[in-house]
Image (spheres, rainbow, N blue to C red):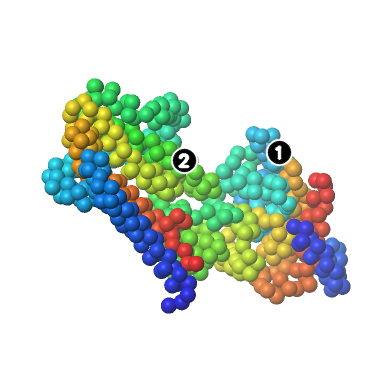
Amino acid sequence: MSAPERTANGGRVLRYLLPVATLVLAVAIWHLVVQIYALPPYKLPGPVLVAQTMVADWDVLSTSLVATLVTTFEGFLLAVAGGVGLAILFNLSRLIEYSLYPFAVVIQVTPVLAIAPLLLIYLPQQGAVLVCAWIVAFFPVLANTTLGLSSVDHNLADLFRLYGASRTQVLFRLKLPSALPHILAGIRIAGGLSLVGAVVAEIAAGSAGAGSGLAFRIAEAGYRLNIPRMFAALILLSISGIVIFFALSGLSHLMLRRWHESAVARDA
Amino acid sequence: MEQSLQAVAALGKPAVQAIVARIRHGSWRGTALSNSPSSLRSAAGPPIVALRDVAKTFANGVEALAGLDLDVRPGEFVSLLGPSGCGKSTALRLIAGLSEPSGGAIAWRDGAARDIGFVFQEPTLMPWTTVARNVALPLSLRHVGTSGAAARVAAALDRVGLAAFRDAYPRELSGGMRMRVSIARALATDADLLLMDEPFAALDEITRFKLNNDLLAVWQALGKTVVFVTHSVFESVYLSGRIVVMTPRPGRVFKQLAIEAPYPRDERFRTSAEYAAYCRLVAEALSQAMGVAA
């Protein structure tokens, strides 16, 4: 094995080893602090108790986890479809873009936590939660896709014109493939945000007294001072976010690895 | 540019000077040098495309071309030579129909559909797909059947020496190879007219010389007509049967020079006294053209 190769491998090992080591260290400190100061569980539960709660309450927590993930996933799919669809529509027609884009911005800049209670009045709860997830997640897809569709190589666009390409051909064979890296970047952000949207809406709905998602469990456990369960639910949400992030990063890498600079490994 | 003019000025050897004198006098290879188009009939037949008094003024008021007259005759290799900003690329885009002239007329030979292969300064490939699919693009946009298209793509790739790279992605190729793919794509539709906009300007000299030779081989083998835009005196002399020297701001034809050296041309021509003499004449014409503009 040559020297640079060893450094590269060393770098990769460190990249995975260091975060794991840091996490173990943090959990150990957490455990020690709880032990040394003999903190009661309603102030700060130790990691062991949180793990025990996770196992003991798994029936409740797993049902809630599935509920939250289903909402997240549905909101995410709608956000991708809505974001890409609107961007294509905007790209095809200036009139539509000028008419609708400001409203997309308004929806985006209004804090979703403030919209959620209103939505809960007008929509059935499941619908309101879904709309919240969509509102939070669709804008990055729309903004990134819009950018991608308009940053087509001018010479390639000329070439398509020269060979008499139709509008459909230009869209599907030039603009969308060119925009793919941008679209995927938007989708990666949307994945995390749709979880945020789902949680925000559940919290809002939870105070109205209905719901079954993880965020609702957190709110409910908070009222009952069941702090260990709050932690357990929070950790599940966190893990969900991490899994979503890595899944979408992997998807993006798979789709771009043959051609885009961002995904191609370089020899040093 | 400055560098190349100095290099040509240094070609002051007696043999070169003698040839320069004979070309000027009209006794070199029995040709006369003149501005009149009729004396420049290196290729036969009526022009494929004729530009008459063509003007192009951009929306920002920049006058790119004014009073441009240019005939492109079937089978010839003609270069548009001039400093940057002389409108040579604009002229090419007008011929391609990518831009409309603000004045004058562009007339096509009867029956000649505007069938064009265009090669840009950049390879301009679709990075997301393979070499073969890039070359096939003009055919698939025109819904040419897959079996017919596949054969033509294979032939075009073979022609530029990239048959083995059909499944590679553009980023996996060198700059010279990407430019070859771009040329293969221009050949795929079997268009009679190839428009090339400084295609080799970004390449290193070794690669450029190689591609010059390969382009000449393709041109001779397929009998295409080539309009080649360049700002290199050396490249234009090496490749062309005719050089159109243009003045900048606004661009128009300053002088036309026939390069009577016979094809096929190779490295021997590149190092000959005749080549040096032509380079010197063309460089003189170019510096006069720039002087006119200044």
Residue A147: which disc? 2
Q: Position of residue B113 (x, y in %)?
A: 53, 48
Q: Nearer the viewer, residue A67 or B21?
A: A67
| Secondary structure of the residue carrying numbered label 1 | strand
Q: Residue at x 48, y 60 (%)?
A: B171
Q: Residue at x 52, y 54 (%)?
A: B124
Q: Is residue A241 left or right of residue B188?
A: left
In the rendered image, the vertical position of residue A230 relative to residue B6, given as above or below? above
Q: Amino acid at mark 2?
A: Leu
> Would you call the spot at circle 1 few (<14 residues within 10 Å), some (14-19), or many (20 or more)?
some
Q: Residue at x 43, y 65 (%)?
A: A11
- Residue beneath disc 1: B63
Q: Is residue A58 left or right of residue A262?
A: left
| Secondary structure of the residue carrying numbered label 2 | helix
Query: Quadrant location of residue A111?
Result: top left
On the same chain: label 2 and label 1? no
